[in-house]
Amino acid sequence: MTERELQDPVARSTVETDHDEGIAMAGFLDRAKEQAQRGLTQGKQKLDDVQAQRAGGDLLKSLGAAYYAERRGSGSPQATQQALQALESHIATHGDGFLRA
């Protein structure tokens, strides 16, 4: 503060009010930043979940196609087994939630 602001109560009050408003604004911005970060984290988690569900669905479809081809005589038991192992690995990592979706 300047010498004038120290001696003038109105000027001192204005400086103190400006300082308090600055602190309040910083607190608001900190809370907004935290909320935005939480939203970003939740959005990324949801995206990861959707991608895992889609991949699980694709693996399940591949297993069905391999099994169908094997039953029709154009596929092999090894191809069906590989598709099953890939699906089981996905389930071990991401769970089987995609089976109910």
Image: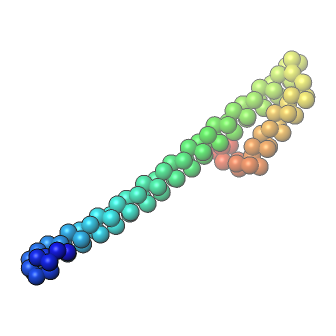
- Give the answer, above or below, for where 68 lies relative to 37: above
Kindly give the residue lying farthest to the top in the view shown.
74
Query: In the rendered picture of this protein, how many numbered marks are placed on residues?
Result: 0
Q: Residue at x 42, y 54 (%)?
A: 36
Image quadrant where one finds the N terminus: bottom left
Q: Residue at x 75, y 43 (%)?
A: 90
Using the image as rendered, state which of residue 77 and residue 29 is in the foreground. 29
Q: Is residue 55 visible?
A: yes
Image quadrant where one finds the C terminus: top right
- Residue 57 pos. (x, y %): 67, 36
Kindly give the residue lying farthest to the front in the view shown.
3
In the rendered structure, the answer to whether residue 34 lies left or right of residue 84 reads: left
In the rendered structure, the answer to whether residue 22 lies left or right of residue 9 reads: right
Using the image as rendered, state which of residue 37 and residue 80 is in the foreground. 37
- Give the answer, above or below, for where 17 lies relative to 40: below
- Residue 34 pos. (x, y %): 43, 60
Residue 8, located in which quarter of the rendered image?
bottom left
Name the colour scheme: rainbow
Q: Is residue 13 visible?
A: no
- Give the answer, above or below, for where 21 lies relative to 93: below
Q: Residue at x 71, y 50 (%)?
A: 95
Q: Residue at x 75, y 29 (%)?
A: 62
In the rendered structure, the answer to whether residue 40 lies left or right of residue 31 reads: right
Using the image as rendered, state which of residue 21 and residue 36 is in the foreground. 21
Using the image as rendered, state which of residue 92 and residue 68 is in the foreground. 92
- Residue 55 pos. (x, y %): 67, 37
In the rendered structure, the answer to whether residue 1 lies left or right of residue 49 reads: left
Residue 26, located in which quarter of the rendered image?
bottom left
Residue 21, located in which quarter of the rendered image?
bottom left
- Residue 27 pos. (x, y %): 34, 67
